[in-house]
Image (spheres, rainbow, N blue to C red):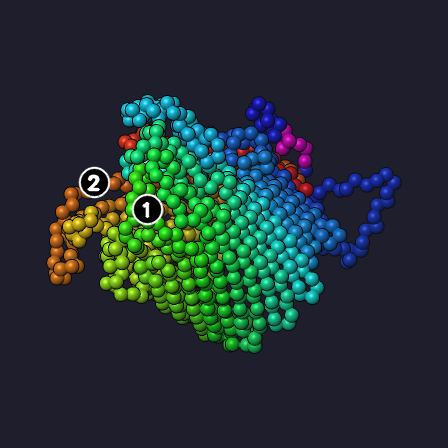
Amino acid sequence: MRIRLLFLAILLGLLPVRAAGQTPPATPKPPGAQPPIPAPAAEADEHPPLPTTYGSIDFGVRGTHIDGDGARYERYRDLGDGLFLDRARYNTEKGGWMFDLAADHAGRRDQRFAGLAARPGQFKIWGQWDQIPMLMSRTTRTLFSATSPGELQIDDAIQSQVQAQASYLATAVQTARTFDLSSRRHIFDGGAEYVARNGFTIQTNVRQTNRDGAIPFGGSFGHGNVVETFAPVEHKLTDVDSSAEYVYGDVLVRGGYTGSWFHNDVPALTFDNPFRVTDTTSGGSRGRIALAPNNSFIGVNGLLSYKLPYKSRASVYVSAGSLRDDDAALLPFTINTALPVVPLERATTDGHARTSAVNLTFTSRPTRTVDFDVRFRTYDYDNKTPVFRVTQRVGYDNAVSTVTNPALQETEPFGVKRATFDADVRFNPLQTFSAGVGFGHQAEERTHRIFEEITDNTFRLSFDTVGNSRFTLRSKYEHTQRRGEGDAAAIAAELIAIGEQGGMRHFDIASRDRDRVTITGAVVPLSSMSLSASLAVGKDDYGESVFGLRDNRHRVYSAGVEYAPDEYRSAGVSYSFERYNSLSRSRQASPGVQFDDASRNWATDATDKAHSIIGHAEFLQIVRNVDLTMFFDYSRTRGLYRYITGPVPDRTLPEETIVPTSLPPPTQLPPVRSDLGRGNVDVFYTLRERWGIGASVGFERYRVKDFSLDADALTRLDPAGALLLGYQYLPYTAATVFLRTVYRF
C-alpha cells in the first residue's frame, strides 16, 4: 500500500509543467474574442499588479523508522507513516476585503487550521484551531484499571495475595498491561477587531483549551510504600479578553475586561493500595488525593495615556480582579473506613482572593542626546480565604493524631503586596555611542513567611554602540541587593517551633547579593559576512543562609558566523557553552541532641554544563531549478551532583572553632549525561512556475544516562516497597523521509 501511495505522489509531482522562470501561460480567451490593443511603450506598466488570489499546497508521503524510544521522538508531534498534507495556504482579495486560510499537518494529531477575514483599517476577524499531542511513553505498564473517571482499581485477588505475601508482587507485575501514557490539547483561539473612523476601536479575544488524557502521578501509603499511578486529565480552560480604545488628539483611553474559567471533570483521584486489600488501623486499602479544583478569575482594567511636550508621554494603567474556587469540596482526612471520622471545619475551600495593580509610566526625550524612562508598579494579591483550623489529622491513612503545636493548627492563606520603581536615563552624545544608568527598587510584603518584608535594590549600567554598519556592541552590568526585614533571633525561634533549623532560609526570599554582566557584539568585516559573540556571567550569594541555597553561578558564552555571498547561497554556524553551579547546605539531624550538632552538616555541590552547535546552509539554484537546504544541531549536557562532608565551622562556638564530621562517607551519584543530535537535508526541484517536487530526510539521535530514570536505574516495576509505571529516559535513533509535491497558484 505504501509503495502505491509513493508512486501516486511521484506521478502527481511529474505532471507536465513549464520550467521555472518562464512566462506563465496565458489565460484562455473565449471564442471570437479580439486581441487587446497594446498600450504605447511609454505608458506600459513596469510593475503589473499583484495577483489578488494566490496560495500553495504542500503534500506527499512519508515514512518513519525509529529504533528505541519512539514516544520521545514524537513527544509533541505526529510523524507517522503515510500520506500527509503538510501545508496549505489560500489568500484572496475581493471588494476591499482580504481573506487568508491556512492548514498545517491536516489529518494528523498535531494539525492546525487558521483563518482571517479583514477589511484593512476597519474590521477583522480571525480564528485558529490547534491540536498539540503529548506522548510521554508507549512502554509504561500498570496493574491499575480505570473503572470510572478518577477511580483506579487493582484486582482484589492480587491485593489479597500481596497482603499475605509481599514477594508475590513480583509475580503480579508480570501480568501488568502496557499502555500509552499520553494527553492532548485542543485549542481554539479567535477574536475580532473593529476600528471606527473617529479613533474608536473594539477588540475581543477568546481562547479555549481542552486537555484530555493521563499524566504520571504518585501516591503513598506511608514512608515504606510508594505507588505510581496515572492521573486522568479532563480539563477545560476558557479565557476572554475584551477592550475598547479611543484616541482623541494627544489622549488615548482604553478600558478592558478579562475573564478566565478553569473546569476539571475529575477533581479527585482514588486508587487501590497494591499491598493491602482490607482497611485496618495500620493502613488503608485505598488512597485518595485532590486534583486541581475548579476556579475562575474576573478582572477589569483601564489605561489613560497622554502625549506631552518634548517628546514625552505619561500613562496610567489600573486593574482589579477576583479569583474564586469556593465550590471546591474538601476531601475528608482519610478514606480508611477502619479509622474514626475526623470532622471538617467546613465542607468547601471557600477560596477567594482579590487582585489589584497600578502601573505609572513616563517616557521622555527632551533633547537629542538624553532620554528618560521612569516606571512605578504596584500589585496586591489579597487572599481572602478563611483560615481552616485543624486540631486532629490523619497521616498516611493509618493513624489519627492530635496537633498540639499551635503554629501548625491553622492554615496560612498566603498573600503578597509588591511595589516596584525603575528609573533609567540614557545619554547619546554620539550617533554611534550611548551610555545609560538605572536604579530599581522593589519592596514586598508577604504573609506567613519567615520574612514578611523584603526589599531589592538594583543598580545597572549599560554601554552600547549602535548605528555602525561594521560593528555593534551592547553591554549591561547589574548589581542587586536583597534584604529581609526582621529580627534574626525571632525568625530562628519561629523556624525551630515548626521543626526547622533556625539558620534555614527559603531561597526566594532569603537575603542575597546578585551580580550579572551581559555583553553581545557583532562585527561585519565584509558585506557578505558577519561575526557575533555574547557573554553572560552572574553570581547569586546567599551569605546569610546557614542552610538552604548558599550560592548560584552561571556562565554562558556563544559565538557564530554567517556568510551569504549572494541571494542564492548562505551558511552559518554557532556554538554556545553554558555552565551552572550551585551549593546547598543541610544538616542530617533528628530532634534532640543531633538538632544542634554541626558535625552532622553536609552539602550538595551541583554542576550542569551544556555544549550546543547549530548550523545551516542554503543553496538555491545549485543546479538548474534545484534548491538544497541543510540544517543540524547538536547538544551535549553533563550534570554532576557531589555530596560534601568534612570539617565545618560551628557558629554556636567561637569563630575559629572547627568540628570534624560525624557522618559516614557518602556514596556519590554517577554523572547525568545526555546527547541529542538532529539534522535535516531537503532537496527541491522546481518543474515550472506552479509545480515542484522535493525530498527531505530528518535524522535524530538521543543518548542518555540518568541515575534515577534510565534503564539501569529502573530495572523493575516493583522495587522494594513500591509499584511503578516503568516510565524511563530511554535512547533512540530515528529518521523520517518525506517525498512531497508543491503546487502554487
Q: Based on the displayed image, in which of its 4 quarters is residue 308 positioned?
A: bottom right
Q: Position of residue 610 (x, y in %)?
A: 35, 47
Residue at image point 32% right, 56% down: 507
Q: Secondary structure at mark 2?
A: loop
Q: Position of residue 94 (x, y in %)?
A: 74, 50
* Left/right of residue 126 with respect to residue 239 in the rendered view: right
Identify the residue at image location x=60%, y=68%: 252
Q: Is residue 12 magenta?
A: yes
User: Which quadrant of the figure contains the C terminus?
Assistant: top right
Q: Which residue is mark 1?
A: 392
Q: Is residue 480 left or right of residue 303?
A: left
Q: Secondary structure at mark 1?
A: strand
Left or right: residue 83 versus residue 145 is: right
Mark 2, other Cα within 10 Å: few <14 / some 14–19 / many ≥20: few
The residue carrying mark 2 is 667
Name the amino acid type tagged 2.
Thr
In the displayed structure, 80 sits above or below 311; it is: above
Magenta region: 11-17
